[in-house]
Amino acid sequence: MNEPDNAAQPPNTPWTCPFCPLLCDTFGVDVGPPGTPLKLLGSDCPRARSALANFDATAGAGRPQVDGQDCHLDTALSTAASLLAASRQPLFGGLGTDVAGARALYALACETDAICDPAQGAAMMHGLRALQDRGGFSTTLAEVRMRADLIVCMTEEPTVHYPELFRRFGVEEREGVAVETLPLHGDLFDTVALLAALVAGRVSKDDARVPAGLAALSARLQAARYAVLVYESGRLPEQGALIIEAIQRIVGTLNRSTRAASLPLGGGDGASTVNQVFAWLSGLPLRSRAGPLGLEHEPLCFDAGRLLADGAVDTLLWVSSYGPEPAPPAAGVPRIVLGHPGMQLPPDAHELVFIPVSTPGISSAGHLFRTDGSVLLPLRPVYEDGLPSVGEVVRRLTQAVQALKRGRVQ
Ligand code: SF4
């Protein structure tokens, strides 16, 4: 991979938005005088606008803290390293970072036997579980834009969370592309299962018990030249992997006679990027640990919320560099937080180390994977805030932990 270009981009250069996994790269950012919130140019995307309001081009904002007191970065790093070196089972959560941050986190996780789970781990596991169990067909944003003639939203209106999605699909610019929303009949499990049966011809469309909307949708899917079934992992209920498997059954059936694919939406705040990096470095996705027993992947047991509730971990390293949220969860264990400088820290700062970090695509360079998984985009900063990146902090933390361990052995 090429070294990132650290130069802040000149005004009016297209900017890659890091605030959702669509990674729109045709808009711009207006950087006003220091202290003024950044403004989005070329789009009214509410998600990006609200995220940009957390940045005001102020250099050097945010100081490291230990137990609620401002301190030098070296002090915060050495306190954090002592906590990690003394921990018998650390948990790395949040994981809001980019490729370089993920690579550094993986090395630190190996050094400390940490378990790693992103902020939206449960949603991510739905897709991973389905992929591990049955595999699947998925497509890219570009392919949808070029070829799809029927787009079916399987989990309600996706533009609530991904405001530019239909623009990315080119829905308004192209003729002959239709957008449908899955009409619910019972719950989502029942509806997708019935649609799969209709598409496969196992249930007749003329059966009086079949709702007319679902029968019509199955006919449109069979008639489409290229149907794309879009779903948001974050909207799926527990056991959502079963719904994804049913969606893949529909796609597989259609592909016998025409062309179809799925398009999952999710893995924002760097989660899918960290997952890809961990997978290529270890062969395993997140909710894994490189520990004394070798590599372990436990998609249920390594749920961060469950581990904290059960008291199964004794230190939390929380990473959230894209904004003040998600903040670290309440936890009765020492916490090390690498976060946005505006993050609201809990009033009880006992055994809490806070290190403010830069944001990829705003105040530092970086790389993120897009929601379609096969496209890695470079991020360029729009201003310099002088804060270290997650990758830089974690590399120093790893060296400090290694030095402490060497000291113990000698
Ligand atoms: S849709 Fe997502 S990537 Fe595109 S501008 Fe909005 S927040 Fe940014």
Image (spheres, rainbow, N blue to C red):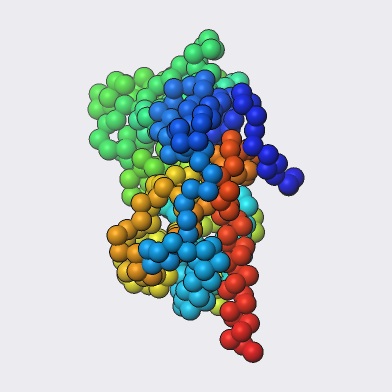
Instruction: From the top left corner, tell me how far across and down residue 28 is, in percent.
Output: 56, 26
Q: Which is more toward the observer, 119 or 240?
A: 119
Compared to 157, does 282 lie above or below? below
Quarter of the picture holding the C terminus: bottom right
The residue at the point 44 percent across, 61 percent down is 70
- Residue at figure coordinates x 36%, y 19% from the top left: 216
306 lies above or below 370: below
Q: Position of residue 67 (x, y in %)?
A: 38, 67
Q: Quadrant of residue 232?
A: top left
Residue closer to the observer: 321 or 25: 321
Pick out the residue farthest to the top: 175
Residue occupying image coordinates x 58% and y 86%: 408
Q: Is residue 407 left or right of residue 34?
A: right
Residue that lies at the very extreme toward the bottom in this rendered image? 410
Where in the figure is residue 405, as x and y percent of width and height? 59, 80
**Does residue 119 appear in this view?**
yes
Using the rendered image of the protein, determine whether residue 277 is visible from the camera's viewpoint.
no
